[in-house]
Amino acid sequence: MSFRPDDDCTAHGRLLGITERLHDAIMARDEDMVHALLDMPSASSLPRKVREEALVVMALPATSMRAPIQLLQFHHRMSELMRDDDAGEALPQLEMPFGRWDSRRSA
């Protein structure tokens, strides 16, 4: 996952940061870090399924092939929302042609 440092100033950016740190902790099998991240006040913004899945994956043996799918899907959705927000700012306002409309003309 790639986290941009300037993303942390937005709500989506903070959630992306949490999901990336949570993913890294799960992959490193760092149970203390997973619990510390989930105990952060901002982690309460994560969906319940994501938080529960993190605990379930950590409870599995290290040889388990289970991936944190809910976490990855949530991260992807937040990334897409941020990308859409960034793209929306760059679009100019659309102009509508202004002219005299003749209501007597038929289409």
Image: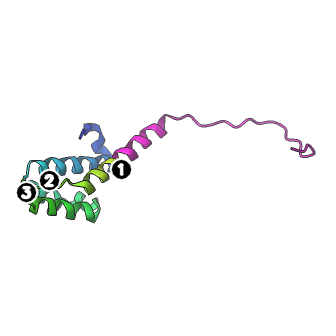
* Residue 31: image tag: 3
Foreground of the two, 33 or 23: 23
Q: Residue 59: give x, y in percent of width and height.
A: 9, 63
Mark sitting earlier along the chain (2/1) = 2
Residue at the location (23% across, 41% down)? 1
Residue 70 as seen in the image, left or right of residue 102: left
Expressed as whole percent of the image width and height from the top left, the position of residue 75 reads 29, 49
Residue range corresponding to the magenta coloring:
79-107
Q: Quadrant of the C terminus?
A: top right
Residue type pointed to by label 2 = Met
Q: Which mark is residue 65?
A: 2
**Front residue (pair 23, 88):** 23
The picture places residue 94, in percent across and down from the top left corner, at 62, 37
Instruction: Tell me the residue at 56%/34% (across/down).
Output: 92
Residue identifier under label 1: 77
Neighbour class for label 1 at 10 Å: few (<14), some, many (≥20)? some
The disc labelled 1 sits on which kind of residue?
A: Arg
Q: In which image quadrant can residue 57 be found?
A: bottom left
